[in-house]
Image (spheres, rainbow, N blue to C red):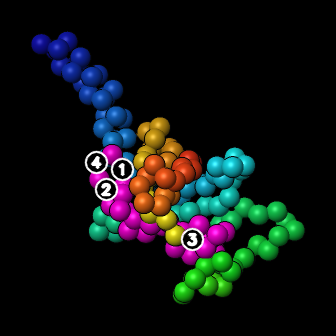
Amino acid sequence: MRQLMKAGLIAMMFAMPAAWAQNASPAGVWKTIDDETGKPKSLVRITEENGVLTGKIDKLFRPADQDQNPKCTSCDGARKDQPIIGMTILWGLKKDGNEYTGGEILDPAKGKTYKSKLTLKDNGSKLDVRGYIGAPMFGRTQTWVREQ
């Protein structure tokens, strides 16, 4: 009986990380990686409130000869000419099975907004961020890396 209990405890210990990964949230700080150059672009802080995700830019990685606090000159409306650092670029995403869907993402470089979905990967250490027009197959994916 005692050996059976030990075996059960050991099995639970191995199963717990998988359960934690399934319940992991995208909330936290993420290093965005440019899908064209493979270089870090920014740090985005994703927060969750009432089951809805929002992401703001905390920091930009830019060469020293570039403006370190650029404005969104390509944006429309209230975002036009506002600082990119501190700007909300991700909003409205809700958990849907293993993904977060129903939201939008802003590309400040182009000033365009796209539908978006997120998928946690590698036990929550990576985040696939897909921006698309119409259907998810008409878009592109960036993989972000968790910082915290």
- Judging by the rendered image, the residue that carries numbered circle 4 is 97
Specify start and end residues of the magenta stretch as a single range: 83-112
**In magenta stretch: residue 86:** yes
- Judging by the rendered image, the residue that carries numbered circle 2 is 95
Q: Nearer the viewer, residue 44 or 119?
A: 119
Q: Nearer the viewer, residue 5 or 132?
A: 132
Tag 1–tag 2 contact (CB < 8 Å): yes
Tag 1–tag 4 contact (CB < 8 Å): yes
Secondary structure at numbered mark 4: loop
Cα distance between the residues tagged 1 and 4:
6 Å
Cα distance between the residues tagged 1 and 2:
6 Å
Tag 3–tag 4 contact (CB < 8 Å): no
Q: Mark 1 or mark 3: name the one nearer the start of the chain.
A: 1
Residue 93 seen in this snapshot = yes
Secondary structure at numbered mark 2: strand
User: How many numbered callouts?
Assistant: 4
Q: Amino acid at mark 4?
A: Gly
Q: Nearer the viewer, residue 66 or 81?
A: 81
Tag 4–tag 2 contact (CB < 8 Å): yes
Residue 84: percent from the left, percent from the top? 64, 75
